[in-house]
Image (cartoon, helix red, strand yellow):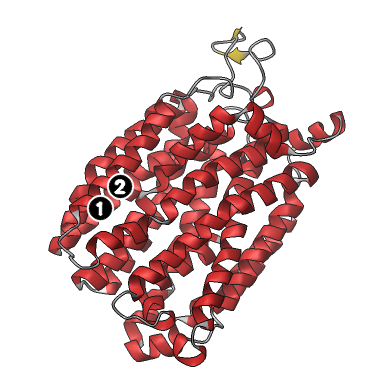
Amino acid sequence: MEYYDFFLYATAASLFFGRLFFPHPAQGTLLALSSLGVAYVARPFGAVLWGHLGDRFGRKKIMIAILLTMGIATFLVGCIPSYATIGPAAPVILVLLRVLQGLSAGGEQAGSALLAFEHAPEGKRAFYTSWTHSGTQFGNFLASVVFLPLTAFLPDDAMLAWGWRIPFWLSALVIAFTFVLRRRLAEPETYQELKQEGPVTKVPLVEVLRGHWRAVLRVAVAGLCLAPTPLVYVFGLSYATTGIGLSRSPMLGLIAGASLTLIATQPLFAMLSDRMGRKPVFVTGAVGCAALTPVWLHAVHTGNWTLIYLAGFAIMGVFFAMQSGVVLATFLEMFPTHIRFTGMAVSFMLGVVGTGFLPAIAQSFVQNDPNNWPPVAWLFVAIILAAGVAVLTGPENHRVPTGELGLTRARRTVPTTGDAATPEVSGLNSAP
């Protein structure tokens, strides 16, 4: 739910922040979208911080601290005076609060997925962790829907003066609700057993980088699979409304509808991967997203609403769902329990950093020429396919018991049929 806060900033930056916080109207949209990337730079630092604390002191307490950091930063964004009121201090404060959001997000997704992963029964890890991404999409759905009535009924002057602030203030309710739920969580059994066996690793990051660097590199590249999100939800929204002149409300409706579709389809593809493996589902999704990206951008450029919706829903609701539904379980299965929070958070966030600046990079191609969309399409195609190759050439761990993930060949057995078991090489020690 706290991803409502994170995506709320992205929606507001695409629609309003260029005019509110940056003094150069011609470059305002580019600067506003660039401010999104600041959070993605901060995310690996948050991953190191929260991952270290989570592996050392437990999952639950750290997840509550992450939640409060995100909530406070988001609420305060809604309180910032505009550039016209306080001058250069306005964008400085905005960026600093975005950094706090990034630090929080650096541990949030990995931590939430980790809790679901370590509570999941054998054979259902992808299904359980997929609800983390479904929760992320519900937050994005709320972040887009909350602007719909405001943009529909308030004039532009009112939206710029005070209307845009309302969704940020409402985030306090979202955070309070999530706080109550998170306090009721218990520590996963696997982590409790680990602590009972002896002291936890003092510096998890050192062990991750020293013994599991192959997995870190693989996850960092595969994490680029999230590229369709900034393509459709951020750059696409800005390009359609500011560059092409399409109406805001239908584009916000597309984002909201795609997010709702993802909530339903991600768990379905996750269940499929629990049965047949992560690779077939993930790679199919990558190929589908790559194939439809030029189609969707061409539709936006020509203002073809039918194709905008059909291709947009196919990209996000089907093919991206194939990737996002299995990606968290796929990555978590590459690390053992005692360093899983740090390993997942750091490596995943390194990949996410690359996607954070994609809206600004894409905007730079069309800033002076809205017809120059093909380079944007091929950039996203290359990134999505690179993520698919990273997963395709990696290990398949969906049948490895949770307690044996990350163990060496001599210590791990993997059930195949009946009660039989066969050894399998750890994904951590496999060559990329």
Residues under labels 2 and 1: Cα distance? 6 Å
Q: Nearer the viewer, residue 392 or 176?
A: 392
Across and down, in percent, residue 198 comes to 87, 31
Residue at point 76% right, 36% down?
Answer: 191
Residue 371 is left or right of residue 401, and the answer is left
Give above or below for 90 relative to 181.
below
Q: Answer yes or no: do the residues labelled 2 and 1 have beta carbons within 8 Å? A: yes
Residue 382: which quarter of the image?
top left
Across and down, in percent, residue 12 comes to 42, 73
The residue singled out by tag 2 in the image is 380
Q: Nearer the viewer, residue 36 or 275?
A: 36
Residue at point 58% right, 30% down?
Answer: 213
Q: Can the viewer see residue 355?
A: yes
Q: Residues within 10 Å of mark 2 (few under 14, many from 20)?
A: many
Across and down, in percent, residue 171 comes to 57, 72
Residue at point 42% right, 24% down?
Answer: 393
- Identified by mark 2, the residue type is Phe
Residue 202 is left or right of residue 333, and the answer is right
SS for callout 1: helix
Q: Can the viewer see residue 257?
A: no
Residue 244 is left or right of residue 205, and the answer is left
Residue 89: which quarter of the image?
bottom right
The residue singled out by tag 1 in the image is 376
